[in-house]
Image: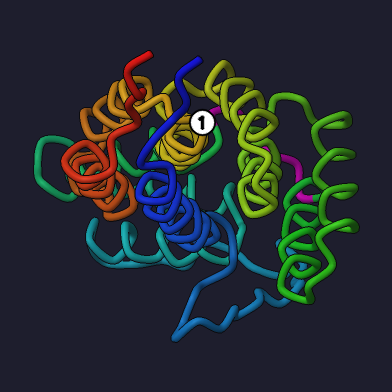
Amino acid sequence: MGKLIEESSTIKPVALIAALVIGSFLLISGLAFTVGKVVVAQLTNRNSQSVPKLGSAREYYEKGVQFKSMGWSELARQCLQRAIVMDRDGPTGAMSRRFLATRIPRYPVPAQAEQKNIEGYNQIGNGNNDAAKATFAALIHDFPQFEWPYGNLSGIYLDEKQPALAQKLCQQALAINPHYVNAMTNLASAKLMQADIAGAETVIKEALRDDPEDQCALLVCRQIEKVKQGGRVTREAR
């Protein structure tokens, strides 16, 4: 029987992709990577916040992005919707529609679910992946139409080098919201970790159709090209 060759040259870039995708993915709802260190969102009550009165569509767009980065999807949704109304046919309106479709949950999310999702991120930031997995699994059970916990849990499984479990979760998230770009990038990474280069390429092209400027998707696309050029999985002659 033949065996896989160039294994090390394939696995190393794939492992790098997984790490980079996870790092980017953690921006989804309250975490950011800065020089290799996790900045954890503070657990703050959404009800203590409100959408301020702003003067332009651009300001509402930027405030929506800020709210999303804090894990407050519904405040972000309100800001983006106001930006769209104020600049329906302009560039800010277009950016807001794209952000709303690709990064904000498809269906309204209760404050309780947002809070638990942020709690899960805090658990990741504290190095407690087991607790985070339990938190996200409970969220999936209690709020099955909320796609973020699926993606977040898939990120943990990628980090633990369990791409099959990550792939299943990403597919469930995309069944809820087919334009959820962060789930697409994690799905592409999961496929690549399983040496499904063609599958990874198909998924990342879909992600870039939805958001041609998504930096994480562009990164994964570049890494796929590197694997195709220098780390192909082939078989020895029998």
Q: Residue at x 53, y 29 (%)?
A: 106
The residue lying furthest to the left in this view is 90
The picture places residue 164, in percent across and down from the top left corner, at 65, 28
The picture places residue 1, in percent across and down from the top left corner, at 51, 15
Q: Could you tell me what secondary structure mostly forms the magenta stretch? A: loop
Q: Is residue 54 magenta?
A: no
Image quadrant where residue 70 sits: bottom right
- Residue 48 visible (yes or no): yes
Depth order, front residue of 128/49? 128
Q: Which residues are magenta?
A: 106-111
- Could you tell whether 96 is left or right of 42 in the image? left
Q: Residue at x 18, y 50 (%)?
A: 92
Q: Amino acid at mark 1?
A: Gln
Q: Is residue 144 above or below residue 68?
A: above
Q: Residues within 10 Å of mark 1 (few under 14, many from 20)?
A: some
The picture places residue 204, in percent across and down from the top left corner, at 31, 32
Q: Is residue 122 above or below residue 105?
A: below
Of the 4 image quadrants, the one containing the C terminus is top left
Residue on which the image places disc 1: 194
Q: Is residue 109 magenta?
A: yes
Depth order, front residue of 153/40? 153
- Could you tell whether 211 is left or right of 27 in the image? left
